[in-house]
Amino acid sequence: DNKEQASKLIDRHLIRDMRGNLRAYGQQKVRCPKCSASYRRVPVSGKCRTIMEKKTDPFTGEEIETLCPGKLILTVTEGGVSKYDGLMQTLIEKYGCNHYIAGLYSQVSKWVAETFESKELGTQQSLWD
């Protein structure tokens, strides 16, 4: 029965993966694409603070530290979280599913939509918008 198979696929694989990805998004790290340093929390400056090289000033004898010029990016993207949303909607429309699965899908889809949109600022474009 297609309805039962669609329900099992959504419940046992797609919903679980989407919820896990949403959880990972909430606990993610940030990463510098230039030097590959990762941070559990975003530094206050909002920039990578990895020391790339140390030089000694020939006149003063002081050490000068050159920091990485990279900007930080998120390790989990919106597309990675919501990748199965369209597939689940298509399966529900085409084959149907039981009421519990349909309700669970609508709830998880709502959580994902609320996570990635702000009513005041619109959709988040970067870490510091």
Image (tube, rainbow, N blue to C red):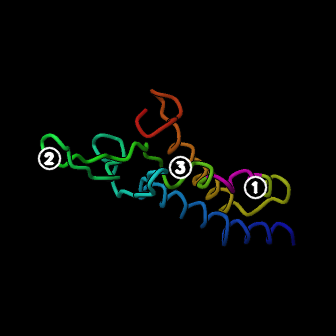
Q: Position of residue 62 (x, y in %)?
A: 14, 46
| Residue holding disc 3 | 111
| Of pointers 1 and 3, the one earlier in the residue sequence | 1
- Disc 1, SS: helix
Task: Determine the residue positioned at 61% across, 50% down.
Answer: 109
Mark-to-mark CA distance, 2 and 3: 53 Å
Q: Nearer the viewer, residue 17 or 4?
A: 17
| Residue holding disc 1 | 87
Q: Nearer the viewer, residue 93 or 123?
A: 123
Left or right of 56? Residue 35 is right
- Disc 3, SS: helix
Under mark 2, the amino acid is Glu
Task: Determine the residue positioned at 43% across, 44% down.
Answer: 70
Disc 2 residue crowd, few under 14, some 14–19, many 20+, Cα 10 Å: few
Q: Are marks 2 and 1 in contact (CB under 8 Å)?
A: no
Under mark 1, the amino acid is Leu
Q: Position of residue 113 (x, y in %)?
A: 57, 43
> Magenta segment, principal secondary structure?
helix
In the rendered image, residue 87 lying in the magenta stretch gets the answer yes
In the rendered view, would you say 126 is above or below 94?
Answer: above
In the rendered view, would you say 30 is above or below 98?
Answer: above
Q: Nearer the viewer, mark 2 or mark 1?
A: 2
In the rendered image, residue 97 lying in the magenta stretch gets the answer no
Q: Which residues are magenta?
A: 82-89
Looking at this view, name the residue that lies furthest to the top.
Answer: 120
Mark-to-mark CA distance, 1 and 3: 17 Å
Left or right of 27? Residue 6 is right
Looking at this view, name the residue that lies furthest to the front.
Answer: 58
Q: What is the quadrant of the N terminus in the image?
A: bottom right
Disc 1 residue crowd, few under 14, some 14–19, many 20+, Cα 10 Å: few
Q: What is the quadrant of the C terminus in the image?
A: top left
Q: Position of residue 39 (x, y in %)?
A: 36, 56
